[in-house]
Amino acid sequence: MGGLYMLDYGAGNVRSLWNAVRKLGYEIQTVKEPADILKAEKLIFPGVGAFGHAMLALESEGYTEPLKQYIASGKPYFGICVGMQTLFEGSDETPDVKGLGIIPGRVRKFDAQTKAVPHMGWNSAAIRKDYRGQDLSEAEATCGISDENRYYFVHSYAVPYEENLEDWVFTTTKYGDEVFVSSVRRGNMFCTQFHPEKSGYSGLRLLKSFLESEKIISEDNVRISTVAHPSVGGFTKRIIACLDVRANDAGDLVVTKGDQYDVREKSTANGDVRNLGKPVDLARRYFEEGADEITFLNITSFRNCPMTDLPMLEVLRRASQDIFVPLTIGGGIRDITDPDGTFHSALHVANEYFRSGADKVSIGSDAVYAAEKYIANGNTSSGTTAIETIAKAYGAQAVVISVDPKRVYVQSPSDTHHHVIKTPYIGPNGEQYCWYQCTVKGGREARDLDVRQLVVACEAMGAGEILLNCMDKDGTNSGYDLELIQDVKDAVSIPVVASSGAGSEQHFIDVFAKTNVEAALAAGIFHRQEVPIANVKKVLKQSGVPCRPMEI
Ligand code: 1PR
């Protein structure tokens, strides 16, 4: 089909959308100049990053007027996330920048007192039962959205559902105590707050219905009833598969797995790097098996890794062609100086990863150094750290902090100036207390910084999520470190991913029952096929923990 265009203002991972459209058998072109917008027969605007940044980028590229003209022409338009928000009058995210003003209403920030913000993960999108006089099955059939499915959201700002929006609102979604507009649909326009290109097969079906449709819906179907749909909460806990990747001694990139971060076989004379499979093949398997997200950690990239040799870029490019759930990449996100003296900022390194298909980047060692400086400067930051520069360009939700802590036992809380917790894992000398010491370089070097100090500083600098490993638990199959996890949850209001130690389905039940963490990550049990992801979700569902259903 000719004439399908994507509006890209250079702010994010448009590769996922491109891959999703290709997967569905369509070709899509990128808007390169204002005239392309008017040439388009169908237009998709996958907005990423801050509202103000998007509006200013549209303005400076000369896209604002052609975009308004395109929408007014009646040709099909699909806005995603910020691509939907820009249609409203304005946003609290950037109060002095006006939106396109096509839909009445304003984008507001979620209340972080009552829930983790950003709203990150899978939630339902409930079609209003009275929608434009259609019955539910008709509405479902014409757009591919179903109340049963879950869609991937990642945002801190949303349009609260209000009565005056009823001519526009197609679905609403509940997050914590707030109900917001998760899609609008009217005339030629269909826009979603969630990311269909990251919403598995449910998202692909929705995109397909847009690509196939002649027109979204006719004007005479404008809604007639005033009964709003009582949106029910459908937010789920996430199950994340993690792939620790490095080159083995033969130079091939393999998925490996450590025991407390030691990835070398003990059974072979040479102590070879443990090889559990090929990164792209394993990641594809986890997507098909129902992983809600996939994380790749390049575990040796703290070594000198020039920009010309970032092997994970190719892994991401290939993985993102067939995987339609969020991909996180970690390892080596920091300022890099190549052997020839060329300097690359952390933002530039992150750009390369986003352009190759990553949705989030995870920062380990560099976050520890940044937090140390932040604390040393009286809890102020320069604005130039990797966390800050990447969060400013791509939004907080794109910046994950990967924490590699290890326990340091003390007899009494007064034995250290660090934040101490009581632990059920008694120390070698009978100690009942410990603090969690941050490490860098894959756990090789310990720093005088505790986990609480790290996560609080990183949240203040603009990080959007914490990936909380535990060196003592990694690879032990003995369950998550629940005390550590709840302690970190209590310290921040951004989402926290529990990691390290999962060895059975029961461990997932425990982590969600005994802490209020948003997601649980595991590596070894999935790689060794000891517990399939489907079984984890089945037992969680039986225990009353909401999960994204398996889909085909
Ligand atoms: O410091 O920004 O270059 O990032 C390096 C990244 O590599 C960090 O995210 C760090 O956690 C990771 N990393 C470095 N060395 C290792 C190692 O294992 N030797 N892996 C490593 C961290 C922990 C988790 C693991 C969970 C679950 N591995 O990724 O997947 O513990 O395992 P389990 O379910 O089998 O218990 P930078």
Image (cartoon, rainbow, N blue to C red):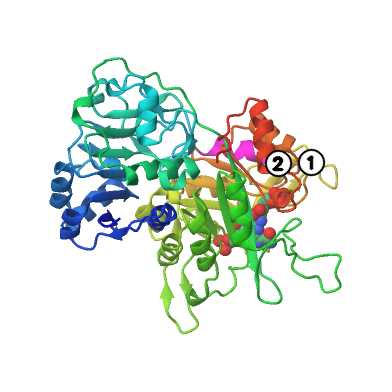
Quadrant of the image occupied by residue 208:
top left
- Magenta range: 484-492
Q: Is residue 116 in sight in this rendering?
A: yes
Camera-near label (1 vs 2) is 2
Q: Nearer the viewer, residue 142 or 168?
A: 142
Residue at the spot of label 1 = 425
Residue for point 43% across, 66% down = 352
Q: Nearer the viewer, residue 227 or 525?
A: 227
Q: Nearer the viewer, residue 291 or 346?
A: 291
| Residue type, label 1 | Tyr
Residue 366, image x and y in percent? Answer: 52, 61
Task: Check contact, mark 1 vs mark 2: CB within 8 A.
Answer: yes
In the picture, the disc for residue 102 is: none
Seen in the picture, residue 520 relative to 125 is either above or below; the reply is below
Mark nearer the N terminus (1 vs 2): 1
Residue at the spot of label 2 = 481
Left or right of residue 474: residue 104: left
Q: Nearer the viewer, residue 92 or 415?
A: 92
Residue 188, image x and y in percent? Answer: 22, 39
| Residue type, label 2 | Asp
Is 475 colored magenta in this rendering?
no
